[in-house]
Amino acid sequence: MKHYFLLLTFVSLTLFSFAQELNKEDQNAQKHLKKNIAVNKLAVEDLSGKTLHTNKVSKLSFKGISSHFTELKGVIEEYCIATLYPLKNVTQVAEGEGNVFAYYPQFQAYFDHSDKQLHAMQKLIIPTGASLVNVYKFDEGDSKGLILEFFVKGTSTYSYGFILENELVTLMDRVANNEIGVITDERDGRTYKWVEIDGQQWFGENLQYDTGEKKLTMHGDVIYSNYNGRFYTFSQASSACPKGWHLPSDNEWKQLEKVAGVTQEDIDVYGNISRNGVDVEPAQELRTNPDLMFYAHLSGALEKDEYGLFKSFEPRKRAYFWTSTKAGEVEATVRWIGHEFGGIVRDKMGVGNYLSCRCVKDQDISAVVETSEKLKAITTKIDANPEDAGNYFDRSIEFFLIGEGKFALKDIDKAIELDGSDLEQKLFKAQILFLYSFDQDADEIRNLVNQYISEIKDNDYAFYFASRLSIYDPKNGGLVATYDSERRKKAIELIGKALSIDPNNPYYNSFNAKLLAVNRDYAKAVSALKKELEHDPKNGETHYLLALMKVKDYHTKNVKNNVNTGEWCTQITGLCFKLTPAQIKDACGSFKKAINYGTEVSPDYLTICAELKQAETLEKHKPIIYTGPRGGRYTINSNGNKCYIPRR
C-alpha cells in the first residue's frame, strides 16, 4: 500500500489589490483578514516527493463587508455548522506581484491515518464551538460570492468558507419553504441535514448514532467517520433513527428512485441488476445532484473476519443502504450503488451484514395510502364503515405486501381489537411479528400460533409455521436452530402434521428434510428429499442438499457397521468421510445435477469428486507387467493390450 503525507506550505501575506476605494470600515476589515485568515497552499505528495494532487485556485476580488448577510448571521450560522450550506475552503496564496484572496473550487485532498488512504474533502469543516461573526463580499469573475468568517472561542482562531451569493440565497429560500433543514438527535445532540424529495423528508447524510457495539479492527480502531457514518445490522438499523424518523421501506425508496430517474418499467426489478434511467444516471443523481441534496457516499460496508474483528468492504467503490422491508426470514431488501454503473440496484442481503442507514421522517398513514390504488380503495371502505374488522385486516395484508410492516401491524391490531375471536387475524399478526420483530416478540408469536393450532386442525401452513417457531430461536436478527432436544422433536411432529394435510408441498418436504438433517437422521432426510424431487425434479437446491445428506448418511452407516472403505477428505476445510467409490459416484451425481440446475455448489465437496476421478484414472493405468533395463514400462492400456512406454 502506498503511503502519503500532506505538504502544507505557509505563505506570508504582504499586499492586497482592490478594484475600488474602500471606506474606513472595509479598510479595517482588510487589515483584520490580512492578520487572521488561515493561509496555506495544499498539496499532497508521496514519500518520494511526487505531487499527487494540488488544488485548483480561483482568484477573488474583495468588495468589503456584507452588512445584509452579516445581519442574518443568526439565521445562517446553524445551517453552515450543520453543513446544510456547503462552504468551500478559503486561503490566500502568492501570485505574481502581490497577494490575492483565493479559494479551492476543486476538492481538497487529505490523508486519513485510520485507513492509510487519500480522501477528498469537498467542503470546509467548521471547528467545534465556532460561531459566525462576519460575512464579506467578493467577486469571482462575473459572479458574486461571500466569505463567511467563523470565530473559534477556545483557540481564538478564525475559519473561512466561500459560497456564491446566489447559491446561499437559493438555499435560504429552500429552508424558508421547508424544503431543506436541520434536525437535532435528542439522544446525542448530533445534527443532520434533511431534504424534501417528492413529499418525503430524507436525511442528506448517513446516520451516525452509536447503538453501543464497538466495531474494532485488529489495530483497535473504531471504523467510523463523520463522512461515512456508522454501519448497522438490519436489527440495529430498524431502531437506530431518531424519534420522529424511521428506516425507509422498499416502497419509500422506490418513490425516491423515480425522482432520481429510475424508469417505471425497472422500478420493481429485483436482483443484482442496475436499474437505469433514460438520459440520466440515477446513481449519480443520488450522489451529486445539488437539487436532490441526497449526497450518497460510497462508504462501502463492514465485514467480520473469523476472529470477530471488522474490516472495510468496498470503501469508495460502493454504497449499501438498508430498507425496513424484509425479503425473507433472514434477509432484507437493500439498495446499493457504485461508481462503475449508473443505475441503482434493488437486491437482498442477510440481516447480519453491516450497512449504512438513511432515515426518513415519519408520515401520516394517508401519505402511504396514496401510493397504492388498492390501499386507497380499502381505505375508502374503512372510512365508510370504521367498525368493520375485515377491512382493517385486508389493508394490513396490502401494507405487508409492500413492505410497510409498521402500518400492517397497526391495522391488524385494530382488526383484533374489533374482533378478537377471529383466529386468522391473530395468525397473520404472528407472521408480521415473526418477520420484523422475532427477537423482541418471540413469546407472543408462539402464543398466537399455538392458540390457533389448538383450535384449527386443517391449516397445513399453521403447522408448518409452528414447526419453524419450535426449531428456531432469534439471534442477531437472524435464526438459529435450538439445542433443546424436546423442541426439535416437536418441530418434526408439527411438520409431519403439515405434510399429512398437504403431502406434496415442496416447502414442507424440504423443511422436513432439513429438520431431519439437524437431528442427524440422514437416512430419513435422504428419503424426504427424494420424495420432494418427485414433484420438483429440477430444483437445484434440493439436489444439493440431497448430495450432502448422501455423503453424511453413507459415512455414518460405514462407521457404524465398520465397513472397510477409504477415507476421502475435502481439500479446503479438511472434512473427512469414510466412503466407497460407488457411494461417492452417487453423491457426486446429485452435486452435478445441482450445478446443472443453476445452484452454486461448494467447491470443497467437489474436491472429493475430483479425487475419485483421478483415482479411477490411475487405477486404469496401474498394471505394470515389467520394467525394462532402460527404464521403460511394459504395461496394459485401457483396451487390455500390452504396450511399451519408453522412459523420458
Image: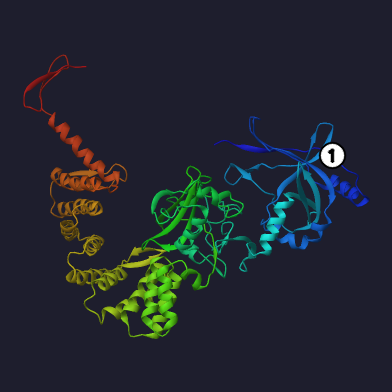
Depicted 68 relative to depicted 604: above or below = below
Q: Quadrant of residue 423?
A: bottom left
Return the residue nearer the eye: 359 or 371. 371
Residue 352 visible (yes or no): no
Query: Relative to residue 507, is residue 299 drawn left or right?
Result: right
The kind of residue on which mark 1 rests is: Leu
Could one spot residue 634 in this view of the protein? yes
Q: Where's the N terminus, which quadrant?
A: top right
- In the image, residue 394 sits, relative to residue 602, either above or below, namely below
Residue highlighted by disc 1: 13
Pinpoint residue 306: horizontal percent, then vertical percent.
42, 50
At 84% from the left and 32% from the top, the residue drawn is 97
Taking the image as shown, residue 416 lies to the left or right of residue 296, namely left
The secondary element bearing badge 1 is classed as: loop
Residue 112 in the image, given as x and y percentages of width and height: 62, 45
Task: Answer with the quarter of the image where residue 52 lies.
Answer: top right
**Image: 352 above or below 418:** above
Q: How far across and down, in percent of the image, does residue 644 sit?
A: 11, 18
Can you tell which quarter of the image residue 16 is in? top right
Pinpoint residue 424: horizontal percent, then vertical percent: 31, 78
Going 37% across and 75% down the picture, which residue do you hit? 394
In the image, farthest residue toward the right: 24
Q: Is disc 1 surrounded by few (<14), some (14 to 19) or many (20+) residues within 10 Å?
A: some
* Numbered marks: total: 1
The colour mode here is rainbow
Relative to 12, residue 310 above or below: below
Q: Of residues 635 and 631, which is closer to you in this image?
A: 635
Name the image quarter holding the C terminus.
Answer: top left
